[in-house]
Image (spheres, rainbow, N blue to C red):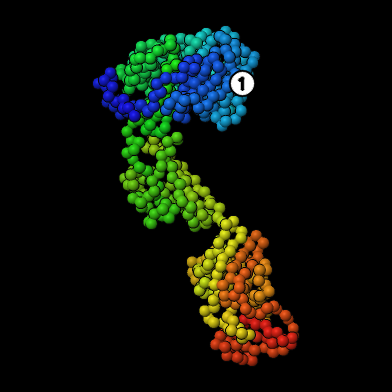
Amino acid sequence: MKKLLLLAAFFAALTMSAQEFTLTELTSTPNVPADRSNNRQGFGMNGQFIVMDKVLGQINFYNPEDGTLENTLETGATASWPAVTRDDAGNIIARVDNSWPGNFMADTTVLKIFPVDGGDPIDVECNIFADFEAENGRCDFFSFIEGNVMDEDEGGILWIVTAKSTGILKVPFIGGEVDADHIALFPIEGATLSPTSSTVVNPYVAADGTKHYMLWTRNAQPVDLVMNDTEDGFIGTTFTLPNKGATNGCFPFTFGGKDLVIYTTLPNYGNAWAIAEKNAEEPIAVIPEIPGFVTNGFQCNWLNAELVNQHKAIIYQYFPGNYFKTYELTIPGGEEHTYAVCGAPAALFGMENDWDAVAAPEMTLNEETGLYEWTSAETELEAGNIEFKIVQDHSWDVCWPASTKDYNNYVVPVENAGVYTLSVTFDPSDPENAVITANLNEVPQQPKVYIIGEVDGNGWATNVGVEMDTEDGVIFTKEVTLHNPTKLVDPIGDNKYCFFSFATKLMEAADDWDGLAPYRFGAVSEATEDNPNGDFRFYKDMMNMPLALTFDGGKAFQVEEGVYTLTVDLENMTLTINGESFTGIENLTIGNVKNVRYYNLQGIESATPFQGVNIVVKEMTDGSKVTTKLVK
């Protein structure tokens, strides 16, 4: 990039305030393609030059890096109209009527809107001067449009001046159409209009926050306009610009707390330009005449600025038939300060300790909006409040809101426990009235399923479980080892049985069974006299069969030790057990009870139950045996 700070032609004359600005050339294309010599009005937007070809009826989009044509919009115009503009939302509006030299009295399509969202072009039929017949006349160029022409409520406004105007015509748009009932002619008090076919009125917001309009006529002094008290006319004040030329091309904007104008300078019809405040003796920056190119007699040197943030603006220069250039205008401060989000709870801000300004996460500058942004990672939060401040340079010396961390924090309520992200935006452009915006977004969570009980070496505890795997939050699987640490032996053989159930959440404490109850689920089984816990005894013929699950008092499954794959279907509430370790009872056949014996955990036999855990073996009349567990 080529620095333009040391241009001998103007550097010595810069004032102290002007030295706050730095102008840097970013891109330059040596030549506009020869077949585009009919390009006329144009402007820069979103990193492209947008130019009207007055003969072909095309709006061309050019890359400023090399001048290549990137896109073309067909307007359908064939009457050599060069007028093209945009509104604040980025919609492109072109004049397309074929009534050269034109008086805006056509009964056919006069304008065409190309929506910023890429929708179909909109033909706009309007007889703009229907009520002001004496005011019609030729108008070659359009000013930028304030507002959004596609908006259904506020809409947008195009201000028009023709060669015969006695005032400035207000042309309102609502929902992509001209609001013909509210077209109005605004007179000017305090200044002379001096209309021509290339006079434009550009709206802008001044540094003090008030709406202004700049009236530009290439062969007259510019005029600063504000609305009168009744908002049906303008009050104008003529102002001067150092070395102003008589070439079309100007743009008012506010930057660095100053009301600035980019404008063409002498010699007339050349490519020199400057930036200055109104009525300044010297400009803030000057780009002198660049020799060695053909002006082609064009009376245009199109200039406009696009604000990136409060410290940087991009300036676009398009000289018809010759070249495109872009510049970066900056003021100090853009990289001098960092802004970080600091608060509590610390985990939300990625910190170990609450209110740690040094460790607080830094915000990122969005160059399109000029705002600083930060979004937290997904964090599990309890119900309560989030509190934070924005700290400058990781220090409490400067922070928002207020000046200390002890009061007036920014508070975001968390109504329900869950997983959230917090998004924060910050606009420090006016430090006394810095704007903070925060949005708390709950993150939908995929369910979790834990196996609790005698699984993978665990015992019964409400804070310990084996998390099952899932891809869709519906089907959960896990290969586990069932092991009975208390060596619960089935008297039928040497088999040892284990007990487990499921939960969708684990507790903080190991014995919080009341807290776990809403999240616990298990077998559909009922307690009996012989099985007061209601545990569900698993038999070999149940392998690979869906077994019913329930949250409503679900019981434990009783399964022989071994390695199994457990599959839980949360949608259908079933458990499927698969494994080759099972060697126990083939199936359950109920006959008449012939004999009942009780065994304690040491394997001692008794005809009556022991106090504590009992293994109950029922010998049936058909020769089968049924084993259950009893706690007395």
- Residue pointed to by mark 1: 124
Secondary structure of the residue carrying numbered label 1: strand
Residue 434: x and y, percent? 40, 38
Q: Is residue 195 visible?
A: yes
Q: Residue at x 52, y 26 (%)?
A: 71
Q: Which residue shows up at 32% across the image and 47% down it? A: 395
Report x, y in % for residue 561: 57, 77
Where is residue 557, by image quadrant?
bottom right
Please tell me which residue lies in front, 631 or 345: 631
Q: Is residue 157 left or right of residue 335?
A: right
Label 1 sits on what residue type? Val
- Say which of 265 and 49 sits in front: 49
Number of numbered discs present? Answer: 1
Point 60% across, 25% down: residue? 121
Looking at the image, residue 529 sits to the left or right of residue 382; the answer is right
Residue most extreme to the left: 12
Give the quarter of the figure containing the C terminus.
bottom right
Q: Residues within 10 Å of mark 1 (few under 14, many from 20)?
A: some
Q: Give percent across and percent down for residue 82.
A: 52, 16
Q: Is residue 372 above or below residue 536?
A: above
Q: Quadrant of residue 310?
A: top left
Q: Residue at x 33, y 44 (%)?
A: 393
Q: Quadrant of the N terminus?
A: top left
- Above-or-below relation of 441 to 337: below
Q: Position of residue 180 (x, y in %)?
A: 61, 19
The residue closer to the viewer here, 385 or 289, is: 289
Task: Tell me, yes or no, if residue 132 can be seen here.
Answer: no
